[in-house]
Image (cartoon, coloured by chain):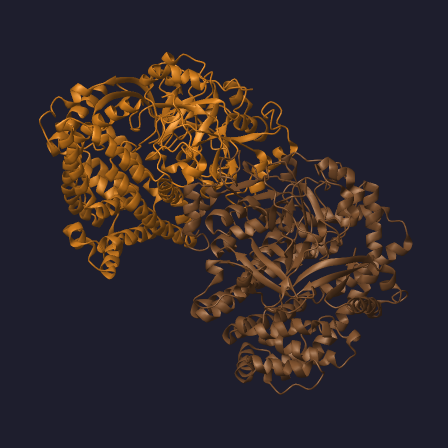
Chain colours: A brown, B orange
Amino acid sequence: MTMRRRLPISALALGIAFTLPAHADEGMWMPSQLPGLAKTLREAGFKGDPESLADVTRAPLSAVVRAGGGTGSFVSPDGLILTNHHVAYGVIQYNSKPGNNLIDHGFIAADRAGELPANPDFRVLVTVGYDKVTEAVLEEAAGKTGRDYFDAVDRASKAIVAECEQEAGMRCSVANTHYGTDFYRIKQLELRDIRLVYAPPRAIGNYGDEIDNFMWPRHTGDFTLLRAYVGQDGKPAAYDPDNVPYRAPAHLTLAKDGPKAGDYAMLAGYPGITYRHRTAAEFDEQVNWTLPARVDVFDELIGVVEAAGARDADAKTHYAAQLQSLKNNRKRAAGELEGLRRSDAARVRAEDERDMLATAAAEKERTDIAALAASLAEASAVRERELLLGLFGSQTQLMRAAIMLERLRVESAKPDAERESGYQVRDHALIEGFLKQVQRRYSPGVEKALLTALLARYQQLPDAQRLPVFDAAFGRTPAELEKSLDTLYAGTTLGDEAARLSRFAAAREGRPLAADPLGDLASKLVPAQLALEQQRKTREGEQLRLRPAYMRALFAWRQQQGRALYPDANGTLRVSFGKVDGFSPRDGVRYTPVTTVAGIVEKNTGEAPFDAPKPLLDGIAAGDFAGTEDAALETQTVNFLTNLDTTGGNSGSPVLNARGELIGLNFDSNWESVSASWMFDPRYKRAVHVDMRYMRWLMDKVYPAPHLLKEMRAD
Amino acid sequence: MTMRRRLPISALALGIAFTLPAHADEGMWMPSQLPGLAKTLREAGFKGDPESLADVTRAPLSAVVRAGGGTGSFVSPDGLILTNHHVAYGVIQYNSKPGNNLIDHGFIAADRAGELPANPDFRVLVTVGYDKVTEAVLEEAAGKTGRDYFDAVDRASKAIVAECEQEAGMRCSVANTHYGTDFYRIKQLELRDIRLVYAPPRAIGNYGDEIDNFMWPRHTGDFTLLRAYVGQDGKPAAYDPDNVPYRAPAHLTLAKDGPKAGDYAMLAGYPGITYRHRTAAEFDEQVNWTLPARVDVFDELIGVVEAAGARDADAKTHYAAQLQSLKNNRKRAAGELEGLRRSDAARVRAEDERDMLATAAAEKERTDIAALAASLAEASAVRERELLLGLFGSQTQLMRAAIMLERLRVESAKPDAERESGYQVRDHALIEGFLKQVQRRYSPGVEKALLTALLARYQQLPDAQRLPVFDAAFGRTPAELEKSLDTLYAGTTLGDEAARLSRFAAAREGRPLAADPLGDLASKLVPAQLALEQQRKTREGEQLRLRPAYMRALFAWRQQQGRALYPDANGTLRVSFGKVDGFSPRDGVRYTPVTTVAGIVEKNTGEAPFDAPKPLLDGIAAGDFAGTEDAALETQTVNFLTNLDTTGGNSGSPVLNARGELIGLNFDSNWESVSASWMFDPRYKRAVHVDMRYMRWLMDKVYPAPHLLKEMRAD
């Protein structure tokens, strides 16, 4: 862990074979691993006690929460939560109305009564329990294979979750760690009444938008403050005006100083998923098929939504979030591809795996690893179909609602514990939330155009990958496809909220749903979907059973190399530590690790996404930064870079200094590092943060909220 | 001159009003000014005697020559000349033949017998005299105005040139300095037998081509070696196999060490033209009309040539140089515009001029300056037509040849001294050279398409700007234009070299030319052109008469500010001094001043213009840089940056260290500084050079020419 070797850049640029070095900066550590890394932590500059970081249910880590799709942290005892503008984007959008556009204008709640309720499905989760349950999860699976193995693990996990959620207000999950090697029960307090407290205008919170997304240098004030409320009994509750602020178990304190190059930094959050310990074959597929295919299909869908938005202002508003997400995904795929090629990831991983296999002695292990490879190959044979069907569900609103309702009806006929995850009683509120907000995110013309794009591709698939029920529903030619979609969307009543909710009421009781063209289609598609799921689960069951052999070989190999092994990200709380650090993206260019307000002015064109608000430009011109300016740079800083190990889900992660004080808010990665979900390349992997001094300055001088600064003790 | 003030970047980026500081780096000094700057030179780090730089006819400056359209320098006693690949591009192209493409493959003359003659119109000029002749030039002009003033100056200048050129082998000129304030007679030895000695392949000499042009970081080996030959009597002569190498009056020595950040650097060369001392009104027009209009028309012409090249490989070859020049001009105009806006040049110049005028006391001076403004406004009224007619002449081959022949016929009827510059006996060889090489650079379809684009714009001009003879020749509608061009180019015989040369023989004696559709058209266009020229010269005469008042006011104002004033560039030898220096193009980004071979590999795609040759890639991979590598960077460097003051014409300028040794070869500016022809902004103005260590390495290890290294004493 303490070794760190950098190759001269010329050798790296040449792609000369190199082994990824063991170094202190790579690693999304489970908190329980940190005491074992005490020496490395101290060498890196950490001034606290590594033991204090081991327990996620104690301060300071208990201040770090899951917020929406990202991370947040308590910054006051009264449930004030700091997260990203883009994490809270749905909350801001939900409260925006014609004539009162909070996205454009930002929002400051004058007092607690003025705080605005979030969309009903927005959640904040506070981890209160974290226990290893491997034996319980795998007990029944022993001796089984394929789907049976999968089901045994699934059943055991659900039973653990169900028992855990007996306690009111808790949301539980079982975290598969090291690919089926270990399982942890995560118990989280589910805060359901979340309110919007402070959001900067879009032109600050999302300055640069897609153009600057994943880019450095960056100049974005990507932060928002929310507040969690609970019932008067202190328990989680749905929104109620009489609810009271949640008493946070711990909160972070804003540092007075800011970051500078070389400073120790650490970050805690909920990274969603990484693939660093996947097989060489999976690396190869990612580089040579998956990413190029994703870029291609996202390009088409972006074009569809943009063309619709250009014709129809209403469609533009409704699809704003989906378009942003599509662009994000497209850019991310392209960046991952570029980065994996630059790091020569497929080759590096292949050579690492080859060396690992050469040392893996046990015959049983070798057999399992070969069987794993065979199962992965089966999945690859249907990858084109899987990509399109995934988008068919995720990129539509009414179609997704119809399928969700039908699936809910089917699942609800079973006892709750046997239902598919996502369709249990505990999921009903989330489903209802989705069904309610379809209205805000749907336009029939756009949905048909998106389906046309996806199904036209589907029609081109070879026979072995197509499904009879899809062929029957959408035909085999563009003309048949157009006709079928016209008929479906002309006849469906699911565009009406009441129609969806009445069917929801029936579906959750397993009762038949009232007739509807889309609903009727869903009743044919869902059985096919279930059959595919069966095949998929059989493969996944095999992989779940076989991957631990691969992981054991990898553990042994890393041990031989003298390197600790962190689990691939799985949405659980992780800690990363490293330092404030610029980098050289290419020969002759050095990125400095801290940006300043000068860059806001340089980029400002007056037109979105570089339309810095006048109060901001005036504030910069006035130069009144006393108290928040950087002493060395003699100006106001905006964003900074660290070499911390992050991925999606780390959005909103608090960045702490050596004393554990809040110096930054993670919100992005640089373009050169988006491939880090597969491979951490220390030359390029950086995380992008809002400098807390910028937030303090904005809240002090530009869009003042002195009461909130006071609450955070930053006044 | 010693003051240097840098503002904090935040203030600069905000465009907060700033006065350009007096600083050591701005200035294209006349050599005679350097002894007066001795203190500044020494403070900057110069180790030599400033007095030694005062005389352009003595070493070391006598080693610096005019080569083609740029600068070159002698690097051996035997007439070996170092200049840019792009300066010698025409020489290399001239010697390329199907099956022996020297552009693609490069060239190494195995010995002197193997050196290849340049195109006949390529010249190298060695300055042998430099004398002030202001009194003689202005003597007759006193009391005159307008065209009469112009003619008096022109007559006097021509008389001086004619007398000077009485000496065989001399080419003389009168350099208008400080806009008519002073005049210098420049006497240059005209070397006409120039041969190609060494050229790297295009993928080294022009690595990155238009994509990297004006860009940093840069990785281009933009150098070529030529050799000057003279007759056995030591006098300039046309190419003859029996000619002998020219004995250079001085030559530069390659430094053993290379440049590093902060090192003193200086450069000598022939900067063509700058506009820094132009009026505020001229700055305003440049920013708000000229540059946007140029970008627009160049875009269209580039499209025309590229479309033709895509259809016709022959056209592509013939127009390669013209296309490169168009792209260069387009990019330069766009960069100038961007830079002038960033430096807020129009406002800064306006405020400087306002302050200057507030201090200018003399009534006569004020009257002259007002009259100058009126004359400039007259020119602005016809600027659209002037732009199009300029391109009509410069972007065509046959049309240009026809007009040139007709003009030559007209001028040749007058006594030589009264002929227009460019059409005197001394110019005949250049005209003949142009007429000969039309063949290599012409394709009727492309020329018609270019004329169609230009004349279609011309047809849109208001009546006041159009000329009856053009309307009659090309009609008033696109259809009439097409018909007229079809007829002209179907009938002309000027595509035939013999036809052009027989008319040349007649024209230079003032005899009538044989009938030809293009020739007949030229006989109508030339009188119109002469009438416009008359108007233009009247305006220019007024400006020539009036600008000295403006310059006197500026001299006085600069003296009040404690700043020396160098003349705007006028194609004469100038010296600039400063240092090796990176810069920050924008917040968060720092460009380092030296690039390395790692960047070549990073940029390499295998496809032009990033198709590094295999021997180069192999050489980099082998890493055998012993003797030429940078000790600190531990690798081979390629290019470097200085803050030296350069402009077009400085291509090929030698860059010297504090001891006067050759460390670099100037070949470009960074994109951020192309506006420096109007305004020197010390934040952004940098010059881009080939590191001589890269050249030495290439000639040692990659495309070896040990005999040439030995000749340069760099073996």
Q: Is residue B661 above or below residue B373?
A: above
- How many numbered marks have been drawn onto this rendered protein structure? 0
Q: Position of residue A322 (x, y in %)?
A: 55, 65
Residue drawn 72% across the image and 72% down it: A426
Whether A281 is drawn above or below A95: the answer is above
* Left or right: residue A245 compared with residue A558: left
Farthest-out residue, left: B143
* Residue A221, visible in the rendered structure: no
Quadrant occupied by the N terminus of chain B: top left
Q: Is residue A121 above or below residue A475?
A: above
Q: Return the residue nearer the eye: B345 or B201.
A: B345
Q: Quadrant of residue A503?
A: bottom right
**x and y, in percent, of residue A74 in the image:** 64, 53
Residue A522: image location, x then y, percent: 65, 80
Name the image quarter holding residue B509: top left
**Quadrant of residue A548 within the rendered picture:** bottom right
The answer to whether residue A642 is visible is yes
Q: Residue at point 76% right, 71% down? A: A535
Q: Is residue A425 left or right of residue B229?
A: right
Q: If the image is split into quadrants, where does the C terminus of chain B sit?
A: top right
Q: Position of residue A640 (x, y in %)?
A: 57, 43
Residue closest to the eye, B3 or B714: B3
Q: Nearer the viewer, residue B245 or B210?
A: B210
